[in-house]
Image (cartoon, rainbow, N blue to C red):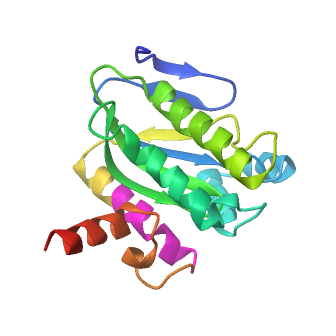
Amino acid sequence: MTQPKGWHSRGYLPHFDSPETIQFVTYRLADSLPRARIEALRSLPDAVLLLDRELDAGLGECWLRNAEIASLAQESLLHFDGQRYRLLAWCVMPNHIHVVVEPIDGHALSAIVKSWKSFTSRQANMRLGRSGAFWEADYFDRYMRNEDHLMRTIEYVENNPVKASLVKEAADWLWSSASYGARTSRSAS
């Protein structure tokens, strides 16, 4: 088990890794945004919003648009739910993934994200008959400051496919907590 690191950096993005701190995490495919575009947007005041808009435009190969690969990514998120972390919301988009997660029992966020990415990259590359980088090396995280911030973030994550014009209703996107919750509640009744 890797211990949480507090504030740290692995290069450009600062990260906050603390036990039982709810985090919003975004990680993306290696080819989802051209480096030149990221550099151009990075200096702008609304860089995070602009980068998010670029991701929703569906640039790159969008390997997660493939139902088999999207399901693989979703299952990797669900695999240790309740053991290493508690999933509060997630959405597997065509070229990126959003997750709202609470690490538990001293598990470090960086180790959790690394396990998601390493498992899916190996499996996806094998299934797609390709090699090379699948995920961008870094990830974005933001800790939830309060209950309102958490609720707005969950709503954002679950409605991302609607905002990106992929579906009309959040529950129609199969690879998200909005759909998963709707499916599990229907099967329980």
Residue 21 to residue 9: above or below: below
Instruction: Tell me what residue is drawn at x 70 percent, y 41 percent.
Output: 136
| Figure quadrant of the N terminus | top left
Answer whether residue 49 is visible to the viewer in this image.
Answer: no
Image quarter for residue 56?
Answer: bottom right
Residue 35 position within the rendered picture, expressed as x and y whole percent measured from the top left: 83, 46
Q: Is 12 inside the magenta-drawn segment?
A: no
Instruction: Tell me what residue is drawn at x 46 percent, y 31 percent.
Output: 112
Q: Main secondary structure of the magenta part?
A: helix
Residue 60 position within the rendered picture, expressed as x and y whole percent measured from the top left: 78, 60
Residue 39 position within the rendered picture, expressed as x and y whole percent measured from the top left: 80, 45
Residue 186 to residue 25: above or below: below
User: Furthest-right residue in view?
Assistant: 36
Answer whether residue 153 is visible to the viewer in this image.
Answer: yes
Residue 76 to residue 186: above or below: above
Please state the extent of the stretch shown in magenta in the rendering. Answer: 153-165
Which of the two residues, 61 or 131, is positioned nearer the viewer here?
131
Q: Is residue 45 left or right of residue 143?
A: right
Instruction: Tell me what residue is drawn at x 49 percent, y 25 percent.
Output: 111
Which of the two residues, 56 or 7, is positioned nearer the viewer here?
56
| Figure quadrant of the C terminus | bottom left
Residue 77 to residue 68: above or below: above
Residue 115 position within the rendered picture, expressed as x and y whole percent measured from the top left: 52, 32
